[in-house]
Image (cartoon, grey):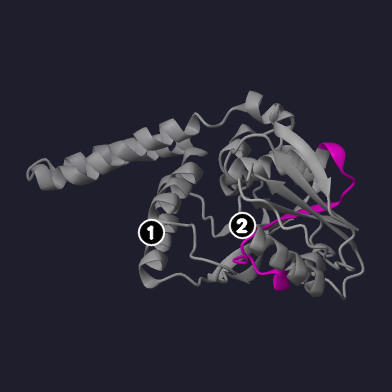
Amino acid sequence: MKFKILIPVYNDWQSVLKLLDNINSSIESLDHEISVIIVNDASNHDRPVDEKDLENIHSVKILNMKINQGHARCIATGLKYIYEKEDFDYVIPMDGDGEDRPEEIPQFINRVEDSKDKVIVGERVKRSENLVFKICYQVHKLVTLTFTGKSIKYGNFTCLPKTTIEKMINEKATWNSFSGSLRKIEKELISIPSARSSRYFGPSKMSFFNLLKHSLSIISVFRQTVLIRSALFIVVYILMIKSNASVITAIPLVLLLVMIYSISNLALRENMEEFNNSLKNILDITKIK
């Protein structure tokens, strides 16, 4: 079978080059054609030109974008490019900083044989961030479950069959949130345990603000469900506090209204026309193997 590993990158070439070495060593025992597609999100740091010996990787291509468009849209563009331009059976999107462990790639590929063309996701069982971030992440999962009814315990690190790729490039939510879109179009997912590792170099880029935006982007995919559940919450909450109404008891309502406003704005990022024209943003393609 033919696998394409999809990696978005912005400036962090040091990590990506180390990741390529680790992918190469991790897939040594696999009898499949494995290639890598890197989406360069208009980096303003030059890529090192050192030759690399990647004997176990079939090919490595870099799609150089004209303008910076963000992590989610890089993945969306990469999926569209692979579906329209490449010969493949499965795509494995993963982060390029080492937080998605290349040692787990064989687990995805070995599970494919009995997956019956279902999506395989890396369910987070361990994270490497500090305690405060871990607590915020659990809150993010709880809020997502409460307002959408969807339990999303995975990120980009997944293994997608061609049938799913076709659905994703025809779903406008993919342009805004990878994991939200995937949960929307696929009801049955196969989970394998995945430990979130530390970045190869430098601190994590997932700040509290980025986590909040990530969480709201996922929730925005299911905004109709969110609006219904929010309306029910507001009615029930007002009935509960009507005899004890105060500025303090109004805080949850204010926060909920802010959340609804935020997801409404983020939902505007779901632009199918931009998604359909995303390959026009490719400046050129560099083949390094």
For marks 2 and 1 on the same chain, the one whose residue lies earlier in the sequence? 2
Please name the residue shown 65% across and 23% down the image: 273
The question of residue 264 being in magenta is answered with: no
- Toward the viewer: 62 or 87? 62
Q: Which SS class for mark 1?
A: helix
- Toward the viewer: 20 or 136? 20
Relative placement, left or right, of 48 versus 51 is: left
Please name the residue shown 38% across and 72% down the image: 131
Q: Is residue 237 above or below residue 145?
A: above
Within the image, what quadrant is residue 240 found in? top left
CA–CA distance in space, label 2 to label 1: 29 Å
Residue 160: image tag: none
- Toward the viewer: 83 or 239? 83
* Amino acid under disc 2: Asp
* Residue identifier under label 2: 12
The quadrant of the rendering that contains the C terminus is bottom right
Residues rendered magenta in the picture:
84-104
Q: Residues within 10 Å of mark 2 (few under 14, many from 20)?
A: some
* Amino acid under disc 1: Val
* Whole-percent x, y for residue 58 in the image: 90, 59
* Residue identifier under label 1: 139
> Does residue 10 appear anywhere in the picture?
yes
Residue lying farthest to the top in this orientation: 273
> Does residue 236 appear anywhere in the picture?
no
* Whole-percent x, y for residue 161 in the image: 79, 51
